[in-house]
């Protein structure tokens, strides 16, 4: 899983990705449970915290100025937003399914490029297919062709800003007579897009336990992505503890508990309706006593209002930092690939509230809207570390800018 922390374009990276995919292919969740035994019992600290209702140094009562200096709050760029763009937070996202419904049988093994190509076929159709149609009828590139290309890219979810920036240099090259034929234009587009996507990756984590918080609106795939990441981490020999921080949606705790049992991972939870910050405090504390390598915090995707949701996430961050200085060390935003340009608005809102370190974009297998990844990378400069290309464990693939560009433009 920590491949994203490696320097980009590392030749070993692709080989490791293949090896990890093989590992995932060769074991399924049930086998892991059998091999590793049942999850450990929930620690006493949960009961203690329940009795106390909130942890000692209850964050609600502590003024911000009393917080330890190195709490994760330092990473929060701004206060919670006072208003949230409702458009970016559709209500009709799909209901979560029971873990049993997930098909964890792997796809046949293919190379990384082939895997990206098959998973991103709908986006390729929308981009490469339409670009091909446009360019097949022209012999040389002029302003009219570039204008049509611009419109095409904007409507393929790259948006106005990114499309304008993407074509800026290319327009100059055309004006200087450096780009004359359609093939040269396609190559220049690929190169420019690749440059936009190749963002520096977060530095390697050197803490134990590494605390990762996973955020995103309801139904985007947070919990199933957490299960997939857990599986990856376990394949790398890491001990994972899951924190059931979504205490709002009924069945959310059960969903994560079933995953934990199937994966043989530890879990700390409290009943629906409990304080999620108390769960997170207990989980981070328990991980330290149990020697866990990684804590992954699942969070709610919906509360009474969007403002409440952001406030809750800020509180969870603060409490995690009280349980372990500097935690959470990494915040992952999960976005649904079907959302198109709204994903950009969601990312801005979450980033403003809690600070997002990396993005995982799910469900790209069923949508032609994958072009939004380019807009997110270009406009927010937040790296995309994984993409979801299906519901199997090994369909969560480390993001590779080159394979992505090839897949959607060739
Ligand atoms: N096709 C496809 N489906 C996915 C992918 N990732 C997640 N899903 C599905 O998306 C649905 C919602 O997933 P959840 O993990 O429950 O979403 P969530 O964000 O935790 O939802 P809430 O807990 O309600 O906030 C499930 O049916 C998943 O199987 C993906 O990459 N491709
Ligand atoms: Mg969930």
Image (tube, rainbow, N blue to C red):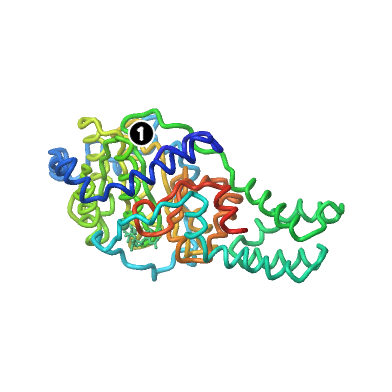
**131 with respect to 56 (left or right):** right
Of residues 404 and 175, the one drawn nearer to the viewer in this rendering:
404
Q: Quadrant of residue 329?
A: top left
Q: In this view, does 148 lie above or below 161?
A: below
Q: Where is residue 387 in the image (x, y as percent from the top left)?
A: 45, 52
Of residues 181 and 340, the one drawn nearer to the viewer in this rendering:
181
The residue to which callout 1 is attached is: 67
Q: Is residue 52 visible?
A: no
User: In the displayed image of the protein, which residue is found farthest to the right?
Assistant: 176
Ligand 1 image-quadrant field? bottom left
Name the secondary structure under disc 1. Answer: loop
Q: Where is residue 262 in the image (x, y as percent from the top left)?
A: 21, 50
Q: In which quarter of the image is residue 20?
A: top left
Few, some or many residues within 10 Å of mark 1 (<14, 14–19, 20+): some
**375 with respect to 390 (left or right):** right
Of residues 362 and 187, the one drawn nearer to the viewer in this rendering:
187
Q: Which residue is drawn at 36% across and 54% down?
A: 222
Of residues 320 and 123, the one drawn nearer to the viewer in this rendering:
123
């Amino acid at each position: 899983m920590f491949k994203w922390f490696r320097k980009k374009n590392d030749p070993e990276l692709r080989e490791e990705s293949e090896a990890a995919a093989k590992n995932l292919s060769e074991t399924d969740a049930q086998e892991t449970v059998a091999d590793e035994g049942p999850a450990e019992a929930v620690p006493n600290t949960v009961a203690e915290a329940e009795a106390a209702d909130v942890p000692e140094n209850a964050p609600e009562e502590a003024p911000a100025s009393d917080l330890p200096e190195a709490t994760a709050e330092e990473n929060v760029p701004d206060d919670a937003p006072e208003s949230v763009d409702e458009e970016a937070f559709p209500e009709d996202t799909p209901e979560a399914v029971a873990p049993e419904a997930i098909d964890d049988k792997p796809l046949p093994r293919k190379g990384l490029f082939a895997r990206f190509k098959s998973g991103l076929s709908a986006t390729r159709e929308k981009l490469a297919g339409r670009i091909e149609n446009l360019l097949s009828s022209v012999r040389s590139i002029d302003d009219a062709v570039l204008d049509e290309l611009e419109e095409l890219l904007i409507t393929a979810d790259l948006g106005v800003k990114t499309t304008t920036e993407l074509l800026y240099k290319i327009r100059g090259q055309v004006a200087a007579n450096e780009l004359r034929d359609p093939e040269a234009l396609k190559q220049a587009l690929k190169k420019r897009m690749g440059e936009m996507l190749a963002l520096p990756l977060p530095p390697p984590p050197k803490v134990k336990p590494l605390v990762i918080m996973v955020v995103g609106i309801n139904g985007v795939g947070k919990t199933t992505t957490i299960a997939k990441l857990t599986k990856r981490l376990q394949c790398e020999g890491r001990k994972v503890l899951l924190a059931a921080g979504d205490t709002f949606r009924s069945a959310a705790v059960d969903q994560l508990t079933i995953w934990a049992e199937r994966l043989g991972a530890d879990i700390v939870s409290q009943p629906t309706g409990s304080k999620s910050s108390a769960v997170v405090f207990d989980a981070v504390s328990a991980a330290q006593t149990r020697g866990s390598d990684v804590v992954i915090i699942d969070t709610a995707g919906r509360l009474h209002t969007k403002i409440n949701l952001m406030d809750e996430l800020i509180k969870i961050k603060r409490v995690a930092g009280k349980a372990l200085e500097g935690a959470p060390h990494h915040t992952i935003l999960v976005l649904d690939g079907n959302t198109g340009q709204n994903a950009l608005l969601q990312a801005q809102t979450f980033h403003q509230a809690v600070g997002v370190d990396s993005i995982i974009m799910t469900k790209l297998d069923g949508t032609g809207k994958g072009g939004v990844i380019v807009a997110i990378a270009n406009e927010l400069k937040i790296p995309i570390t994984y993409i979801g290309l299906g519901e199997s464990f090994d369909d969560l693939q480390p993001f590779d800018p080159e394979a992505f560009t090839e897949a959607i433009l060739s």
